[in-house]
Amino acid sequence: MTGNARVCAIVGVGPGNGAALASRFARDGYRVALLARTTAMTAPLAAELGGLAIACDVADPASVGAAFEQISTTLGAPGVVVFNAGSGVWGTIEEVSAADFERAWRVNAFGLFHVAKATVPAMKRAGGGAIVVIGATASRRGGAKTAAFAPAKAAQRSLCESMARQLWPSGIHVSLIVVDAVIDIPATRARMPDKPDAFFSKPADIAELAHHLAHQPRSAWTFEAEARPFGETW
């Protein structure tokens, strides 16, 4: 990776994967920007990591543009972007609303589109970079209860693949992590108190995989990696 490789933007930071991603890249010496809809959770974490917390709604193109302008001005253009924003309402076609469907698409696919538009030009000028997208197995199959979420994740995956095919020759490593797991955070533990540790994927381990993808040698780049706990049925 070339260019401003020491700046990493984490798009979509919550108490699970997002926080773990920010911590992992900061531990490796990156100046990290933490993007979330509000800074209530990210501001203390950014202060702890010596990073920058920015309020950003990825469904809003103007918000995305302003956020990355602030990152470039304050830290420098990111050499690594991890797109972890994901939103979806669980329900069948009879249960979800048109607004649910559109919001899922705007966050997962439209959001990635605008983040890429905001960051790819600078990566090209720098001679390279890395964009890691946190996806889901819903991108491959539409379950009865994923009438809004699965189409959004499928669109995200297709966009990610299109970007990879175009941008790899420019030295920009676009990759996708397909997460097939329930993430181990207090909220999911509380909802599933009967599940053993083996049922959950730990945010720190997913962050480790993302960090690895961002630093792979160019002769052996990965496009799609799957992440699931060893006990998951697949």
Image: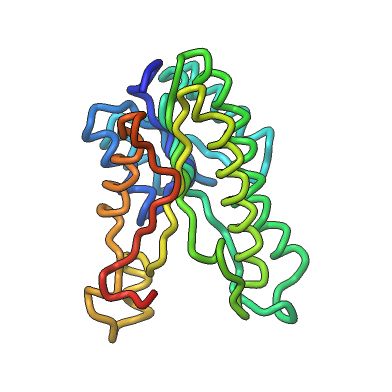
From this view, report whether residue 124 is shown above or below residue 51.
above
Between 20 and 123, the residue placed more toward the observer is 123
Residue at 35%, 35% (x, y): give it: 214
What residue occupies the far right of the structure in this picture? 98
Residue at 43%, 31% (x, y): give it: 130
- For the C terminus, the quadrant is bottom left
Q: Position of residue 26 (x, y in %)?
A: 27, 34
From this view, report whether residue 206 is shown above or below residue 96.
above
In this rendering, does residue 160 appear at all? yes
Q: Quadrant of residue 184?
A: bottom left
Q: Is residue 135 left or right of residue 29?
A: right
Q: Position of residue 215 (x, y in %)?
A: 31, 33
Q: Position of residue 182 (x, y in %)?
A: 38, 69
Residue at 30%, 27% (x, y): give it: 30
Q: Is residue 70 left or right of residue 159?
A: left
Between 50 and 162, the residue placed more toward the observer is 162
From this view, report whether residue 153 is shown above or below residue 191.
above
- For the N terminus, the quadrant is top left
